[in-house]
Amino acid sequence: MIRQESLTAEFGALLRSYLVTEDEAELYRASELGRRLAAQGVGPDALVASYHAALRALFAERASSRAAPAVDKAAGLLLEAMMAYALAFREHQRAEQQRLEEMRRYSQELERHERELRTIVDNVVDGLVLLDGQETVRLANREVTHLLHRPLDELVGRPLPFERLPFPAARLKDALRDIRVGRDQLIEWEVDSASASWRIMAVPVHHGPQFFGTLIVVRDITRQRQLDRMKDDLIGLAVHELRAPLAIILGYADLIIGRNLSAATGVEYVRTIQESAEHLTRLVDDFLTIHRLESGAMPIHLRPTSVAPLAGAVARQFDATTHCHRVLSTVETDLPRVLADPDRVTQVLTNLVSNAIKYSPHGGVIRLDARVAKDAVEVSVIDQGLGLPPEAIPSLFGKFYRVPTPDRQNIAGTGLGLAICQKIVAAHGGRIWAESDGPGRGSRFSFSLPIADGEERGADSRSARDPSARTSSE
Ligand code: ATP
Ligand code: MG
């Protein structure tokens, strides 16, 4: 770009030359020079200054010169040229502004694209790393920063820190080499550490026909592995548990087919088969329920729910079918509502009441009750049955646990009922527990459910309320 001094100097030279030669071409050259300078972005200050200097020189010449008309003409031409410069400069400025505006829009667009890409990449649950041909990190998502315990700005633009990977790096290095030399299109493998498992995928990335680098995808499959293991355990146990009732069914079917039985004995055997088949059905249902609860596939539809009608219905249903027990609900109808799935709460109550009946072989009263405790409602099923030895209490809610005392040897069961209850209650954010004064002194199984938002709380005084506000199975 031409500097202001040289501009003035050139103007001066052109004007002097004009005054000597009276050659108008010199003036036009001066005007052209101005236009060119304006197009280069020389500001109006510089132009005005040079015009000013040029005009001053002209007028000085005019005073001493006899060639006044020539000087006047030169001044006129210069003013015209100045107008032309001003226009050219304004045009230049407008074009410049437009270019800036376009650049701003373009960079905004770029920023938006980058933000969108970042959001997508960060929201991928898998770890994503893009390495270039030199194994320098070009892109990494949030999951990778967790995996490598490094912030993003310490990863991007630097070599991948293989030593920080939570799994041995040798296999990955081999894969990167194989991809670089074009031996493979996709390499996929699984690794396990003591506490976690991953599936890793490496794929080549190209820019047009050119190899750019490798995209590594790291997927945490720990939960999937756990579920697979749980499923295997459950299948093993299921097969084991299903064998006993199946053997009974087959044995009695053989007896019926192979022997000449009296009608009464035949009916008795068929009844045994029926009971075993029912037991089988229950087992399969329980296995499925446990599996669904453990894998998170059991839908729980939480809504504000009153416990009293549910407890009343369960009590009435059992009271109608049991002979030597009395089942009743004393749950108050004006308790605050809980945030729960009514079907699941009924399932828990049904399990607890059926246990209470089953483990009260000599009959007795079974009572359902509930009270407010801080932010929860605690529901209890109280019986007068076999009770619990203290050492059994911590194990009761584990899968397949059954109390091994002789008094219940002949009571059938699988040990899944309380495990199911525990998982359902946990899915509601509550807890479940058992109390007993000891063997032969009855049991009390209780669980808590959170009070729904907007319900009145802390009404511990309810037990002193009017007893007519109760539901009962009577
Ligand atoms: P399932 O319910 O799967 O048919 P189950 O009743 O044996 O079999 P759980 O309901 O999980 O299994 O109960 C575990 C154990 O806890 C039972 O075997 C029983 O010994 C004991 N138990 C449960 N409820 C009571 C109760 N109300 N009184 C005394 N013991 C109980
Ligand atoms: Mg049970």
Image: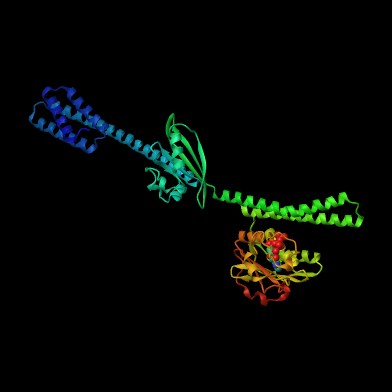
At 18% from the left and 37% from the top, the residue drawn is: 49
**Residue 257 placed where, x, y %?**
87, 49
At 85% from the left and 52% from the top, the residue drawn is: 255
Indicate the quadrant of ligand 1 in the picture: bottom right
Q: Quadrant of the N terminus?
A: top left
Q: Which of 370 and 45 is in front in this view?
A: 370
**Residue 188 placed where, x, y %?**
51, 39
Q: Nearer the viewer, residue 333 or 52?
A: 333
| The quarter of the displayed image where residue 67 is located | top left
Q: Nearer the viewer, residue 215 or 468?
A: 215
Q: In this view, does 57 lie above or below 190?
A: above
**Residue 132 placed where, x, y %?**
40, 37
Relative placement, left or right, of 5 versus 196 is: left
**Residue 139 placed where, x, y %?**
42, 42
Q: In which quarter of the image is the C terminus?
A: bottom right
Relative placement, left or right, of 130 versus 409 is: left
Q: Is residue 461 above or below residue 191?
A: below
At 27% from the left and 34% from the top, the residue drawn is: 89
At 64% from the left and 63% from the top, the residue drawn is: 397
Q: In this view, does 199 lie above or below 382?
A: above
Relative placement, left or right, of 450 versus 315 is: left
